[in-house]
Amino acid sequence: MERYYQPEMECASREDMKKLQDERLVKQVKHVWDNVPYYRKKMEEKGVTPADIRGIEDLHKLPFLAKDDLRQAYPYGLMGKPLKECVRIHSTSGTTGKRVVAFYTQHDIDLWEDCCARALMAAGATEEDVCQVAYGYGLFTGGAGLNGGSHKVGCLTVPASSGNTERQIMFIQDLQATILCCTPSYAAYLGESMKELGLTADQIPLKAGIFGAEAWSEEMRQDIQNTLGIKAYDIYGLTELSGPGVAFECSEQRGMHINEDHFIAEIIDPNTGEVLPEGTKGELVFTSLTKEAFPLLRYRTRDICVLTREKCSCGRTLIKMAKPMGRSDDMLIIRGVNVFPSQIEAVLINAGYPANYQIIIDRVKNTDTFDVEVEMTPEMFTDNMGEIKARQRELEGGLRNMLGISAHVVLVAPKTIVRSEGKAVRVIDKRKI
């Protein structure tokens, strides 16, 4: 039987939810106008005032915020509350320029933890469960968010943080952990490590996992579910909006419910900024309705996905977002073709390879080179070069069919590619573009 943490919100009628969103949006726009001069200036440049926003149908009138705005306003330029009312920061693992620093009041943290509690209960968590949180703690939002959500549900929470795989496995076995929260690549690695210890799925006490913070394919999900003997749930979030729990998967495992009482989602054309009709693929944009300290309006996530209001068997009425199909900025353009790492992952897993691979792109004599290094499983490993070459050609054919361009595949020995305990580094782009 489906269980909810806050059924009055998770199963609200469309009319009630829209009324709440209208009220919260009007209040939030006024809060931002009064307290965030950076965004007020953007509104003034666009000729918009709070009086122009009477409900969510007016949302399109507001200016966008993008990652670049967050860098320009770093560190305090987008704060909506005085420092004395803020109790915590989190920060992205940004790889370029300034990191994004997000601020939280105690109220912001309470609401964020509610969202994570909804995700945990959707995955079947109760106060009887032992929840092992193997996301990183510290500046990264993963550990803190799921830790707080687990407390709210009443689970015994194991704040294991990421890494130290031997200890993770010891706690899973000794404490009989039933729920695992971590990145999908680390879940796959834990599964692989347990398999090497001779543990079969029925000897692992886990029953469910909540995996997010990086892209993962449906094939990778099946792989993790089979190895660990669990049901694997997706979770979505951004540091800029709070962290994990912006959207979460239910038992149907077909898209993630967005916590619409806290976040309004739009899909836009990434090139023109025009709002697209529901069911159309485009860039996901979020407006935070309840954040006090870091209240972002119309934030461009760069994630490409689709929104749907199709009725869900779990009983929740919250709109669903599809698993992001890639990113408008992380998308690789190789020889003029759009390539998403998840497409490559699907080909590899379907051919029986583990999700341990690296994509290496370079530019030689004005032409893109496209190499994919793939780890063999111990069972596949051989020093027969003829067999290895045949396997490489087979994968190259599969990738050409999926992507429409050719890649050079190099099969490497098991355990050659560095394992990730945080977000996996899948792409090395050496081009000087």
Image (spheres, grey):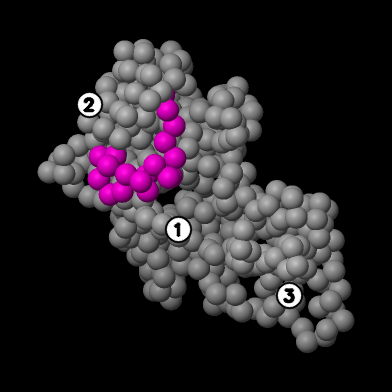
What amino acid is at disc 2?
A: Asp
- Give the magenta range: 62-79
Label 1: which secondary element: loop
Residue 358, image x, y percentages: 63, 67
Judging by the rendered image, the residue that carries numbered circle 3 is 411
State whether residue 12 is above or below residue 408: above
* Residue name at image x 74 percent, y 63 percent: 366
Label 2: which secondary element: helix
How far, Cα to Cα, is label 2 from label 3? 58 Å
Contact flag, marks 2 and 3 (Cβ < 8 Å) = no
Label 3: which secondary element: strand
Judging by the rendered image, the residue that carries numbered circle 2 is 34
Q: Quadrant of residue 120?
A: top left
Residue 415, image x, y percentages: 60, 78
Residue 341, image x, y percentages: 65, 55
* Residue furthest bottom in the image: 383
Between 298 and 386, the one nearer to me in the picture = 298
